[in-house]
Image (tube, rainbow, N blue to C red):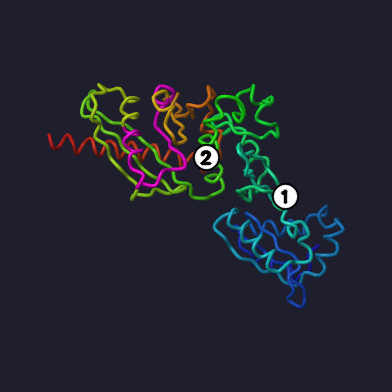
Amino acid sequence: MASKQIQEQIKKLPTHAGVYLFMDKNEEILYIGKAINIKKRIQSHFSSEKSSQRPISAKLYPQVKRIDCIETRDEKEALLLEQKLVKLYQPKYNIELKDDKSYARVAITQEAFPRVFITRQTKNVNAEFIGPFVESKELKLFLAKIRLLLPYRTCKNKFEKPCLDYHLGLCPAHGKISEKYPLLLQGARALIKLYNGESPLLECYDVSHTHGSNTSASMITFKGTRAYKAGYRLFNIRSKTNGDDPRALKETLERRLTHPEWQFPDLILIDGGRSQLSQLKHTPLPIIGVAKYNRESGRATLYSPYTNQAIELSSLPDSIIQTFLRMRDEAHRFAIKQQRKRQNKI
């Protein structure tokens, strides 16, 4: 049970996400933690009988004389601040965080055909790390989903010895299709970074026309979850597509690739499914498509030109769902805007 002094402090704590600090009578930091709801989390520390019976808790709680906190925008920001403060102050009771193994990270190895896997160990591993991630179970589910669209290697098998996942279409680091592996890895990396709140460069395209004529295409750009208006472009389609959106998209991508001065994206998203992607499978940038398959429910499906698999957009984290839908809607809005401008000039 908390002392009256601590109970009074708990009453004044915020209910937002953030980091909290337990201090002793000498203002020494004993423990640093993070929470979605600071007040609720600290109440659980001192009110849970099971928690207070743990040996480490029995030693820690009686020493706590003051509770301080720092509010953050969300749990992700709280996690990063927690790690920063723990490394800085090295509190006695933050045993798990001291060795930097508490939170999961995605490792992408520095091999000819890099492996992708989840790890809590970052020392003595020659790899790029993305993270940390708060929920390792959700991370596993997320990686399993995106691997259906953008297969990547997880095995330690040599190139000449295909693994079981290779036969399931999930590990393209063996055999003839390995030439596309850098594209698959680049796309997977972009999605993992987006999930982690980083800012990969994303492009989205949409086609608009008037009864098959006056076709134009829009290119919009996002940095992470935010629109990057300086990267917006419009294309008046030169070839006679007669309402053939896949052909219009193919011309658009071909013309876009002739502009290396526009920074190439980490991942391309198009508004369309298999028919649109069929024209784009040789694009030298990773690409996926989002298409509605149920107009009544508004549910959308994600496809890629690299596999026969498809996944529901709703199966991905909410941050990615909302980003993809905003990108698709913005590309459509921008294409319609250009189409109306052309019609007004006629």
Query: In the image, 194: left or right of 221?
Result: right
Query: Which labelled disc corresponds to residue 186?
Result: 2
Q: Amino acid at mark 1?
A: Gln
Q: Position of residue 213 (x, y in %)?
A: 21, 25
Query: In the image, 309: left or right of 138?
Result: left
Q: Amino acid at mark 2?
A: Gln
Viewer-nearest residue: 165 or 217: 165
Write down the region rendered in magenta.
252-277
Magenta stretch contains residue 274: yes
Q: Position of residue 304 (x, y in %)?
A: 49, 28
Q: Which residue is mark 1?
A: 121
User: Which class describes the residues within 10 Å of circle 1: few (<14), some (14-19), or many (20+)?
Assistant: some
Q: Position of residue 270 (x, y in %)?
A: 40, 33
Q: Residue at x 57, y 55 (%)?
A: 74
Q: Position of residue 346 (x, y in %)?
A: 12, 34
Q: Residue at x 83, y 52 (%)?
A: 50
Secondary structure, mark 2, is: helix
Q: Residue at x 69, y 66 (%)?
A: 21
User: Which class describes the residues within 10 Å of circle 2: few (<14), some (14-19), or many (20+)?
Assistant: some
